Amino acid sequence: MSDLIQKFAEKLRVLRGEKNISQDALSKLTDIDRSYIGRIDRGEVNISLDKLFKIAKALKCQPADLMPEIDLSND
């Protein structure tokens, strides 16, 4: 998968850890299947905006807090 998806997954894992929310708990809070949450966590899938906002709401953060930082100066 792309570097952006991997960086998103890493930020998600960090935020989940900081808030002490397991994959199972996140699944229940978002109504997203637990196995799919696992795939998101491992950077195996490119999620929709709908899922991004559900996850952000469950983690009580802004969607932007989950987004990876990118260097646009090299484009």
Image (cartoon, helix red, strand yellow):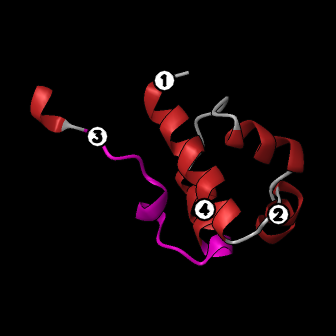
Mark 1 residue element: loop
**Which residue position is annotated with label 2?**
31
Q: Residue 25 versus residue 36: which sits nearer the camera? A: 25
Q: Per the image, is 64 magenta? A: yes
Q: CA distance from mark 4 to mark 3?
A: 18 Å
Q: Position of residue 19 (x, y in %)?
A: 68, 72
Mark 4 residue element: helix
Q: Per the image, is 43 magenta? A: no
Where residue 2 is drawn, which disc sits there? 1
Residue 75 in view (yes/no):
no
Is 37 on the left or on the right of 2, as rendered?
right
Q: CA distance from mark 2 to mark 3?
A: 29 Å
Q: Residue 63 versus residue 68: which sits nearer the camera? A: 68
Say whether disc 3 or disc 1 marks the residue closer to the N-terminus: 1
Q: Position of residue 1 (x, y in %)?
A: 56, 21
Q: Nearer the viewer, mark 4 or mark 3?
A: 4
Task: Determine the image quadrant of residue 50.
Answer: bottom right
**Which residue position is annotated with label 3?**
70
Task: Determine the image quadrant of residue 39.
Answer: top right
Amino acid type, callout 3: Ile
Count neighbours of disc 3 (C-alpha within 10 A) and say few if under 14, some if 14 to 19, many if 20 or more.
few
Say whether disc 4 or disc 3 marks the residue closer to the N-terminus: 4
**Which residue position is annotated with label 4?**
15
- Above or below, 66 against 54 in this view is above
Mark 2 residue element: loop
**Picture residue at 89% right of the left edge, 58% below the top:** 24
Q: Do the CB atoms of the residues marked 4 and 2 lie less than 8 Å apart?
A: no
Count neighbours of disc 2 (C-alpha within 10 A) and say few if under 14, some if 14 to 19, many if 20 or more.
few
Q: CA distance from mark 3 to mark 1?
A: 13 Å
Where residue 68 is drawn, which disc sits there? none
Work out which residue is located at the far bottom of the displayed protein and give it.
Answer: 60
Say whether disc 2 or disc 1 marks the residue closer to the N-terminus: 1
